[in-house]
Image: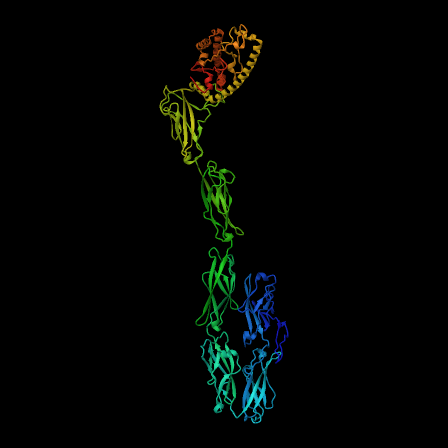
Amino acid sequence: MALRRRQRRGPGGGRALLGAVLLCVWWRAAAERVRYAIPEELGRGSLVGPLARDLGLSADELPARKLRLSEEKQYFTVNEENGNLYVNERLDREEMCGASGACSVSFEALLHNPLNIFHVEVAIEDVNDNSPTFSKAALDLEIDEWTLPGARFPLEMARDADAGSNSLLTYQLTSHPSFSLTMKEKAGGKKQPELILERALDREKQSSFELVLTAVDGGEPARSGTVQVRINVTDANDNPPVFSKSLYEARVAENLPAGSLVLRVQATDADAGSNGRVSYSFGNVPGDVSSFFTIDRESGEIRTVGPLDFEAENTYVFGLEAMDGGGLTDHCEVQIDITDENDNAPEITILSLSSPVPEDAPTGTVVALLKVRDRDSGENGQVSCELSGEAPLSIVASPGGSYKVVTASALDREQAAEHRVTVVARDRGRPALWSSAELVLEVSDVNDNAPVFEEAAYSAYVAENNAAGALVLRVQARDADAGANGRVSYWLAGGSAGAAGAAPLVSVEARSGALYAQRSLDYEQCREFAVAVRAQDGGAPARSSTATVRVFVLDRNDNAPRVLWPAAGAGAAVAPGEAAGAAAPPFEVVPRSAEAGYLVAKVVAVDADAGRNAWLSYELVQASEPALFRVGLHSGEVRTARAVSERDAAKQRVVAVVKDHGQPALSATATLHVVLAESLQEALPELSERAAGAEAPAAELQFYLVLALALLSALLVLSVALAVLARLRRAGPPAVLRCLGAQRFSVAGAAFPADFCEGTLPYSYNLCVAAPARAVPEAAWPPPPPVPVLSAEELLGGDSCEKQISSSSGVVGDPPAEPKALQRCLQCREEAAGAAVDREEREEARSATGSPARCGPALSLFSCVGRRRNGQRSSLPCGEVLNGVERA
């Protein structure tokens, strides 16, 4: 460390800067104490020492460790880049420490991450920058002319503000044959200059002398101060005043009120008169002494001027001078010791506070550094610290009057996000004084809590046929953490889809936790399903929890009852003569001897819904004989309401309605055909006729198709006929018409092939036109007679057929029909009956498909079907079958 000194030269000299070598001496007094020594008077920016390196820190660690100083007065500063300690302002040892032998400045160096404290002490070494000074510009002495040689006259001592060797003074007196200078040793190693009279004085020869007293200190280079000594030769005053003690000592307590008596000095003079009158005054004393004390010139009492402060100065040492009326003086020294009073409460300084601190900080983590100082001394300055308030913190004492506040147990932000404790410092004085400081420690959040659902399992009820996107349920999870650690988002973590398959049924909104249906739900396909919803926070790493949501689909009445029996379009049996693949309505055979309550059939129906929506009730809505049957309300059993009578029709049709109990109610109907017969063989003819009637709709459709084709064929034939007629008009009547004799048209109408009843579509026509006796122009021909249309009964009955022919002939006024035409009609009837007997099964099939045999004119579309009823042959017109009307 460079030692910088200043030299003050004598009068007329200047100041020069002699050196800039900085002597850096440091050592470790303890594991956490660093000491430096520097000279005073260093300017701002002067290097004190490499503090960071001495603390074991590298340049790379400095930004993270955040090295800083904690001191009351900013004498020093630390560079953040290199960690060196520099002087912040000019240091004056005399101003800082006064006359104290040792002068040092102590402060703390703080390091963070981890938090630590080091005690630094900088010793301020004295530099000889102060010259000795005298309190007076001139010292006046009066020496009686009768004074004998060898007499001693004490002179005022010079004062040097420096310390150590720099304050040790030697005195020199200008050479004079009448006077010499000697030194008198005093307490503390100080030297009192004394003037010695070498030879007798003669006032009449020389009444005054002027000498120069020089005080030189022991510094290097030495500094000096001078004072003029004026000696006045007077008449004889041969006894100087004498103090009773050379050193007066007193001990007083601080905080004495102003004007309090400290001590009394006394000096006596053997002379009489004015030469024996003694007055007291301060000698060459520091300026602060006269600020605190005053002396009575007559009595020698020393009193306080203002309050004394032990902490500012605990000892005052100064000199007093006693002078008689003749100018003779004597000097003594006064030492006043100030005793300490417990007038200062402890001072608490928060050096560092780590707030906020993470809640997962381990036990023993340093959260605050404190320094406690009591300016009193002894027991009055001994301080103990404690924490008041309930908090997981404790305080630990460290060397140098510092304290660490550490965590005593684990922190939990969810229980307490902030801890307020009061540090109480109390001294041991009587009475004890104390002070306090509040610490507010915030606890920062750590993601140590997973989201917690309000319920471990949720249940939701959704009616089926809901709209896609309908709200199902809203789940909510709470996270005790804060910020992003407590921000919860929701996800689907899995679950069972039930009968709905693997397609997702619900979705969850990430922020709100609302579950929405992805599509419409169907109770009949999926009655319930479960999904797992995961709640996850935004911490790193994230924490999550899962809750199960069971969704129950509520049934709605969206399915009508379905009749299982009797099934529509499915026959219970196939009657002989019917095609095996033909669909016939179901039927039941009830004997005519059945009594009331006879079980006819049971309507079996199911409803895919559930609950009340699937409760079925049965009602009879239509029957051929409403009073004959009844239906069980809940069983669906069709029973006879009364006994069957002979007047009841053989074929009965019963229609029952099946209704559920939903809102609104849905229904279905069941149709049951009942045949009243004693046995199945007796019921077969009725069943065959009913089967044919059951096929009426299909036959009717086929009839319209056949009719359309027939019309097209007729148009084609008509076109051909017109073309032939046009040709015959030009060429005359063809020979083929001559077979008709004198008639232009045949009364018998069109002739059909013998096997026409076996066909499906009538495409063959025979047109018989009689050849006229002579050629007649086309315009002269009379209109053709109408084609006779015969009913089935007239066609198949001999009487009807003859009657029809006769009536037809009579209408037009033509001759009666030939016997051959009548025979042809009867022959057709016999052939139809014989064909029915020989080929009953095939004719029944053709009758069921709507392709009847034809008999008579082409446009009549009659069919001849032979049947047996009760062992007797009967005929049923095919035209009525096509129209869906069954006639007995």
In front of the other: 538 or 467: 467
Colouring method of the image = rainbow
Which quarter shows the N terminus? bottom right
864 sits to left or right of 6: left
Determine whether 389 is above or below 202 in the image.
Answer: above
Visible residue check, residue 585: yes
Determine whether 542 is above or below 588 in the image.
Answer: below
Which quarter shows the C terminus? top left
In front of the other: 730 or 620: 730
In front of the other: 771 or 425: 771
Determine whether 262 is above or below 813 in the image.
Answer: below
Identity of the residue drawn at 42% across and 32% down? 666
Give percent across and percent down for residue 104. Answer: 56, 72
Determine whether 219 is above or below 140 in the image.
Answer: above
Identity of the residue drawn at 48% across and 21% down? 700
Q: Residue furthest top?
A: 773
Give percent across and percent down for residue 97. Answer: 54, 74
Visible residue check, residue 768: no
